[in-house]
Image (tube, rainbow, N blue to C red):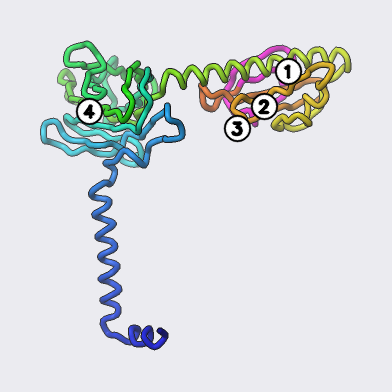
Amino acid sequence: MDKLLQWYNRLPARNLIVAGVAAIGVFAAFQAFASGGEYKAGPGTDETSPTVWSVPGRYFLSCKSTTGGDDCLFPKNANTDVYAKSNYTVTYRTINLPAGAYAMKINYANVGKSVPTNYSYAVKIKVNGQPISAGEDGTVLLPTTGKQPWKADFPVTLPAGETTISMEWTNDNTSDPAHETNFSVSNVSLTSKQATEAVAKRDDQRRNDLNQYRSSLSKYVVANSKYPEQNTALGMTPSSEPFAALKGKFMTTFLTDPTKNQAYYYISNGSRYGICADLESEQGTRYEVGPSGSRQTKGSAKECALLN
């Protein structure tokens, strides 16, 4: 084998052979990109739950110009949006989903100059070929107020299996041609009503759990003149504070997050405390309780701080 390798290395055409193999590899990779490229629904799909599907705008099943004009494009320095300068139809295909009621959310934006005041995009949205609106041609008006990307929510009922979602947009801003009203899709998602209700139920349990701890701590401080101390915010366990001090006389059952995938956090200097839980219904939001009450605020439970 060693002699054969030495013979190969002395060949004058060796470099040409290597270059040829490399070129074939590059060509194959290019072909794979050209045939799929950004025009695909799989890689951007969230498949962590059978009742939740979401995909960035640029990962679509197909995108074509309605009038045969401009191709579908991606905004500069953007990794999510898809748009076209004139008229186009973009189509998405979901993973297999259970039959039932869903909330369809579309995140969209404008590409180009600012849109006119009180402007709305006229978009034909269809699910499995059926318009989601009873209006003329199934057209819905998507407003452009507030911060981008804008959000639109629609209730839809789906059969089991894959679902096709299409959006057709026409640049109909004829009253003010100076403005470029390029409708771009940032994200499309479907969340089952059942999953939404389950999330709300778990958040309610988190609030109830923390208020039970608050009630027990109010009794503990009367008996001990201070709260169980914990200098830094740590995830609560049956052997850590405050449950370690409350167990028995003030609480009989350790309460933890309903998913078991995250913890409630506790911090106290003896005179004040904070107990916090991450909420599912609003990402980046926590529920926290202290001696004087409770509230919902931005931030994670790990950032739990002392409250009055």
Q: Could you say which disc has been placed on residue 213 in the image?
A: 1
Q: Is residue 259 above or below residue 290?
A: below
Which residue is denoted by mark 2 in the rendering? 264
**Badge 1 amino acid:** Tyr
Q: CA distance from mark 1 to mark 4?
A: 55 Å
Choose mark 3 or mark 1, whichever is in front. 3
Q: Which residues are magenta?
A: 287-308
> Mark 4 highlights which residue?
180
- What separation in Å lies between label 2 and label 3 (alpha carbons)? 10 Å
Nearer to us of marks 2 and 3 is 3
x and y percent of residue 172 in the render?
17, 21
Q: Amino acid at mark 2?
A: Tyr
**293 or 210, which lies in front?**
210
Q: Secondary structure under badge 2?
A: loop
Q: How far across and down, in percent of the image, does residue 99 sit?
A: 36, 22
User: Which residue type does callout 4 highlight?
Assistant: Glu
**x, y percent for residue 252:** 78, 19
**CA distance separating discs 1 and 2:** 11 Å
Q: Is residue 17 left or right of residue 206?
A: left
Q: Are marks 4 and 3 in contact (CB under 8 Å)?
A: no
Instruction: Look at 29% across and 32% down and name the residue there.
Output: 93
User: What x and y, as percent, mark residue 238?
Assistant: 75, 29
